[in-house]
Amino acid sequence: MDKRVPSLDLLRAIAISLVLLLHCQEFVTGLSNTSIYLFSYGWIGVDLFFVLSGFLIGSQAFNSKENESSPIIKFLTKRFFRTMPLYYFILLIYIFIKPLVGFPFNDNKIKFFFFLQNFFSPKDFVQSWSLCIEEQFYILFSVIFFKFELKKIPSYLWLMPGLFSILVRLFFYQSGIEANTLPTSAYNYQFNFFAHLDGIAWGIFLASTFNTWSKYKNKMNILAVGILLLMITLIYIGPNNLNSKVILSYQLLAMSFSLILVGLYDFKKIPFGKVIQYLATWSYGIYLWNNLTARFISKALFAQSNFLKFSIYILVTVLLSAFTYYLIEKPTLKLRNNLLSKIK
């Protein structure tokens, strides 16, 4: 494996674990009210992924060399080979293989090939909505960033997309009140590109200010503030992110996770380090596979015990992710590196 930052691996592992717990509710029955309450918070894992993604992709942009002749091409090549091969592989499984085992693909296929499904509230391969937001943002970001040479603009300006998203959500909410169509859940807002840029914006802000905060000696105070803010945020928004709370929820989560990222960044030794590292390495595959696995288990193993269903869900999802990492992700990353070495 490539050299990794242990603290970022830990956050990736936490994020994907939250997503797994959220989706296991599709087939696990008879959970206590406390378990349902806690598992329902799993959706926040995606917002943690947004912050991590913004930080890592932003770091690539800010660390690019000044004299590169094709920075946009390099940036998009890195992004394409990191995300597209596995995405399209699993998309083809959803479209052509899933119907063969009794699960028809219940959506328009064309929009999935062009990453437009988040504008139409996807009905299938639903988890791909977050990837759409990331791809749309990074294409726009790379063009603007490198075209206008924005490395040296004031760092606080990178927070503007997130503040813009607050206004968009406020507009949607007020429009819903006036039209008597007020949604009761953030589900109606979270897919929209313009309404969910908070986490990515904060991640890029962290990348732009890295040389400042990375020098802080005592990051434990920042970690404590981040955890406290996260606890307050979770109590405030509740597990279902209802009604007007959606206006500020994504921004508060992005701030909390950003503070936690900074506070944890210098941690070198993580408990169960190898397990965390592999879980983080395979997290992209786990994210794309887990919904399909959960749906299959809910039908094929309906009468089995919760423990058995949950164990098979985790095992199959992780094994599929590991398999496709070595079959698809790792070879295409090697191909990417070869191509990048030839781009001047």
Image: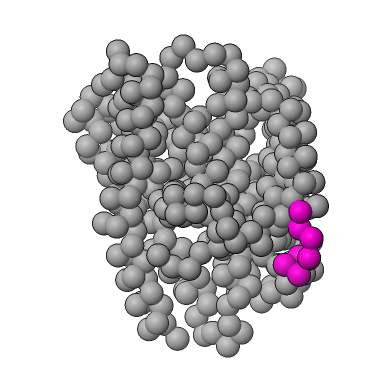
Q: Is residue 216 magenta?
A: yes
Residue 46 vertical placement versus 83 (above, below): above
Residue 239 in magenta? no
Q: Relative to the observer, which residue lies in front, 114 or 313?
A: 313
Is 218 placed left or right of 114 in the picture? right
Q: Quadrant of residue 14?
A: top right
Q: What secondary structure do most residues of the magenta stretch adopt?
A: loop
Point out the image quarter for the C terminus: bottom left
The image quarter in which residue 308 lies: top left
Residue visible at 22% across and 37% down in the picture? 97
Residue 273, percent across and down? 49, 54
Q: Residue furthest left?
A: 100
The magenta segment: 213-220
Residue 126 on image: x %, y %: 44, 35
Query: Is residue 284 among what the camera can see?
Result: no
Question: Which quadrant is home to the N terminus?
Answer: bottom left
Please state which of residues 171 and 264 is positioned toward the viewer in this rendering: 264
Residue at (19, 30) in percent of width and height: 100
- Is residue 217 in sight in this rendering? yes
In the rendering, at what x and y percent does residue 187 appear? 58, 29
Q: Position of residue 3 (x, y in %)?
A: 48, 68
